[in-house]
Image: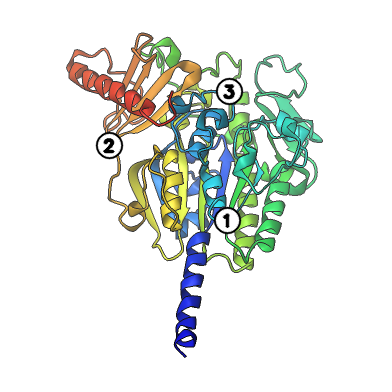
Amino acid sequence: MKSLFLLPFFLLAFAGSTFAKEGKFNVLFIISDDLTYTALSCYGNTVCETPNIDRLAERGTRFTRAYCQGTYCGPSRASFMSGYYPHATGALGYSNPRPQIGDRATWSQHFKDHGYYAARVSKIYHMGVPGGIEYGGDGRNHDHYNGADDALSWTERFNSPGPEWKAKGDGETLEGNPDGKKPVVGGNTFVVVEADGDDLVHSDGKTAQKAARLLKKHKDERFWLGVGFVRPHVPFVSPRKYYEPFKPYEKMELPPKVPGDWDDIPKPGINYKTSKNMKMDIRRQKKAVGGYYASVAYMDAQVGVVLDALEENGLSENTIVIFTSDHGYHLGEHDFWAKVSLRDESSGVPLIISVPGKKPAVCDSLVELLDLYPTLSDLCGLPVPERLQGKNIAPLLDDPKKEVRDAAFSVAPMRKGFLLRTHDHVFIQYEEDASKGIELFDVKTDPNGYTNLAEDPEHADTVAAFRKKMEEKLAAVRANDLGL
């Protein structure tokens, strides 16, 4: 009788341990490629409508001051997936961080090790666009097609091939084509293609459909599902219907062009793509903005497909959904285009975290993509590895006025640049000894960053304080257990 009496308690204990192993929630991680937060209507854009990302923001916490840790794809993705800053691992380019982190678990691998089905669809680690998307492959045993992916991070992985710049339709090369004679070309080039056919012709349409099927297939188990959309990364290729709201392109508005805007910033502070070196006249610049917005609208529609599948399979109440981008993107601010720069347009990212049971909120606290690994581990009831360099921002979901850090840190390895972003200032230095220059902007009085105060004697103390803080931050970044 005694053993029978204890049996229900034994079963409860067993069930509890199994639940702990599987975690409290599923994780659906949706990431766009080269997306500036300024293009989203939930962040205030009145031209480009993003209703599906907006509906996620309406039920989650929208972070207004989230920053990536590397201002181009490779180092950013390696950072948030490994849990380390780029200079901690040395993953400063387009490589996989595995050689540096050894047997330490990546973010998705940590969940896999605790009983989760872990899968990615398309680009989570770095993958060349358009090249890697054109190659396609099944994502399983063909490393040639998987970019800088990490096989140990996944239970399964899937790629989504698409035609990219070769898509049938009306195309134009905008960059380096002042006489209009250059045909549509591949590579990291500003190209607009108003494509024939429907959403499923392209990579992101296939990604959304595959993600929807995986949600249905794995709805009865715990999962960490990464869904990587490649738009709005160049080429700006989308089905024709997504371009209509932005035509004629002449109606697109460009950011202000300020005479002498570059005169007071160091040479490395001038971005690698500018209106000048891309030889884009005003017509082409406006078409670039319209093409980018069309790509964002197409990507947003695919986010809707995934969110619909989540709801249709009864997963909304037990799944945490994250939406973000690997970094931001310039759309003509300071006559800069694309990524790499450490200004807010390039280093800032959209970040929305929706947790079942949490109230919707807007959070202005400084956060980093590096914070996702420890935060999601905590929210799902999994152990949080002490070695991680990010911070647990879960408390901000209950109290968005809390602060977890006094500055966000990001790097631009291509320019050997380093950023400290506080609520009041943008501080950028080039080279670790600042020998290639410094930028200091007062966000309160100069939110768009037109006046570099680094050489102003009245701000000498502020510059000195930031230089000391940067030296300490770089030392702390390298003070890890990687032995580097």
Which residue is situated farthest in the top direction here? Answer: 435
- Return the x and y of residue 217 as percentages of the image width and height: 69, 62
**Residue appearing at x 58%, y 33% in the figure:** 289
Q: Are marks 1 and 2 in contact (CB under 8 Å)?
A: no
The mark that comes first in sequence, 1 or 2, is 1
Mark 1: give few (<14), some (14-19) or many (20+) Cα within 10 Å.
many
Q: Are marks 3 and 2 in contact (CB under 8 Å)?
A: no
| Tag in front: 3 or 2 | 2
**Residue appearing at x 77%, y 42% in the figure:** 138
Mark 3 element type = helix
Residue type marked 1: Tyr
- Return the x and y of residue 156 as percentages of the image width and height: 68, 48
The residue beneath circle 3 is 282
Mark 1 element type = loop
Q: Is 226 above or below relative to 2? A: above
Instruction: Please indicate whether residue 277 sits to the left or right of residue 3 in the image.
Output: right
Which residue is situated farthest in the bottom direction here? Answer: 1
The residue beneath circle 1 is 116
Instruction: Please indicate whether residue 432 sits to the left or right of residue 124 in the image.
Output: left
The residue beneath circle 2 is 406
- Return the x and y of residue 269 as percentages of the image width and height: 43, 16
Residue type marked 2: Asp
